[in-house]
Amino acid sequence: MLKVLVSDPISDLGIQQLMDAEDVVVDKKTGLSEDELIQIIGDYDALLVRSQTRVTPAIMKAGTRLKVVGRAGVGVDNINLEAATERGIIVINAPDGNTITTCEHTFAMMMALARHIPQAYAKTINGTWDRKTFLGVELRNKTLGVLGMGRIGSEVAKRAKAFGMNILGYDPFLTKERAEKMGVTLASVDDIIRNADFMTVHTPLTPETKHMIARPQFEVMKKGMRIINCARGGIIDEMALIEAIDEGIVAGAAFDVFESEPPAADHPFLSHANIIVTPHLGASTVEAQENVAIDVSEQVLHILRNEPFKNAVNMPPVAPSVMNIIQPYFKLGETLGSFAAQMANEAIQEIHIDYSGDLSEVDTQQLTRYVLKGILERHLGSEANIVNSLHLAKIREINVVVSQAPRTKGFTNLITVTLKNQHEQERRIAGTLLAGYGERIVRLDHFPVDFAPEDHQIFISHNDKPGIIGRVGTLLGENDVNIASMQVGRKIIGGAAIMILTVDKEVPKEVLQKLIELPELNTAQEIVLQK
Ligand SMILES: NC(=O)C1=CN([C@@H]2O[C@H](COP(=O)(O)OP(=O)(O)OC[C@H]3O[C@@H](n4cnc5c(N)ncnc54)[C@H](O)[C@@H]3O)[C@@H](O)[C@H]2O)C=CC1
Ligand SMILES: O=C(O)CCC(=O)C(=O)O
């Protein structure tokens, strides 16, 4: 049974599909300390979190069965990605499900800030009818600066246009053309600081964005600016902001997020008349919580069941159009890797992966991870997976060389894997995906072959002589090993040759030994695959 731990409050409706899955048990245990999590995480295959649980290296270390950490939301700053990658734990998030909700919260904050709604509400319910203090400003004809024009920033810009605002947008990936299409003026951070009436930030917190708005920016800021942060605490320097408000540079601020959450009781934001706050509620709507929980549950199920998945944060993203092309080759890539690793009997120093034909013009990085997983699994077992296979090869100083070429020697697609040892000796295997036939191995070392890889095969090398096939067949038959298919390969009559037999079950060690002892054979080995 697969076990999933849900350690933060996550929508029940969203995780329903996990709870309904017959091969999955879901435990909900929220509010655990790091030590408590360390005690129990070893029992689980997957961990589902929102932003409260800090998934530390110690938790990953204790999670010996842990295959995936799923974040029901966007930001993964509560998950140690480095530790996850090192341990081969896949980290996935649900990047799309809370975009609109967080955008709407940003707008709620911007309007509340413009019209002093929280302050006016507090006074009114306390019995003071004050119509003088809370003079607001309109959004119409104001300039809104948006730092970070990703999913949320773009939606904010779209809605701001409907309010008649002029929008200045900055994002390292925002082109002039895309900005124009959105009705946004492409600007620099400096333009925004000097010209915006409202500024909202929608970037992740990275070393580059930490304190991107701090004392030097406040010093040149347009007087009277209002600032909103519904992204991550720390993008705006909190103490520098307080100073800027007190000096009259900034008119007010609305923050949903803090450098440290929850903020200390004496945090200056909590008592400042010109600052309004919410407790990280950006994504807190019924709709968003269902969306992100559904997304993340679906992907966790795929991962636990070894099916293709998306939204892995600790692997490079793959465009859907590319994924459609390379995904059918994942299993073949792994098979070739595993086969090649079993052919090599010395430490591997270099791995060459050549993609040709249909695979020559797409980004094959993800496919390479599968080939490497197949190779490394031989010695590292389940420690190797597609998240850490590149990393594992790198720390073992195995040189991975990937090439792509349009020519295919008659195949529409071909993957060739060559393993080199320290003596420059090579083992090579090539495979293709044939429409209607599936995976075919078409080359072993320098011999052309054509067979469908199976769970068990015997790989024999010998010299081409009459009678060898019969002798091998008799020996296996006498020992109750049924041959499903046989392929022989040779370059010249009477020269070096290979024989590949697919058999129905595991070959007993003593039978393999008897084969090795046949004087006509040079080598015989069992190749085991997981088909
Ligand atoms: N308050 C809340 O409850 C929520 C907060 N968030 C946070 O909102 C932020 C934005 O989320 P999304 O729009 O979904 O992410 P996104 O990944 O779609 O957009 C982020 C954008 O920031 C840009 N960026 C990175 N460095 C930058 C820099 N130095 N200057 C300007 N732009 C930069 C990126 O190029 C990207 O386009 C994230 O920090 C996320 O964690 C998201 C959902 C809910
Ligand atoms: O789970 C939450 O409520 C926080 C959402 C958030 O900050 C995010 O998705 O980045």
Image (cartoon, helix red, strand yellow):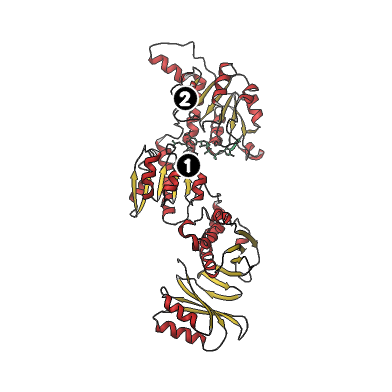
Q: Which percent across, then down, holds residue 381?
A: 46, 60
Under tag 1, what secondary structure? Answer: loop
Q: How far apart are marks 2 and 1 (CA)?
A: 25 Å
User: Residue visible at 54% across and 60% down?
Assistant: 372
- Residue 250 disc label: none
Image quarter where the N terminus lies is bottom left
Image quarter where the C terminus lies is bottom left
Question: In which image quadrant can residue 465 be found?
Answer: bottom right
User: Residue visible at 45% across and 17% down?
Assistant: 119
Q: Can residue 311 be seen in this view?
A: no
Q: Which percent across, then down, holds residue 86?
A: 51, 50
Using a 10 Å C-alpha cutoff, classify the residue at mark 1 as few (fewer than 14 neighbours), some (14 to 19) or many (20 or more).
many
Q: Which percent across, then down, holds residue 70?
A: 44, 45
Under tag 2, what secondary structure? Answer: strand
User: Camera-side residue: 351 or 133?
Assistant: 351
Q: In this view, does 203 lie above or below 394?
A: above
Marks 2,1: beta carbons within 8 A? no
Q: Earlier in the sequence, mark 2 or mark 1?
A: 1
| Amino acid tagged 1 | Ile
Mark 2 vs mark 1: in front: 1
Q: Which percent across, then down, holds residue 52?
A: 42, 36
| Amino acid tagged 2 | Val
The residue labelled by disc 1 is 79
Horizontal arrangement in the rendering, residue 506 relative to residue 399 (left or right): left
Q: Can residue 493 be seen in this view?
A: yes
User: Camera-side residue: 328 or 506?
Assistant: 506
User: Camera-side residue: 43 or 96?
Assistant: 43
Using a 10 Å C-alpha cutoff, classify the residue at mark 2 as few (fewer than 14 neighbours), some (14 to 19) or many (20 or more).
many
Q: How many marks?
A: 2
Q: In this view, does 286 lie above or below 144?
A: below
The residue labelled by disc 2 is 277
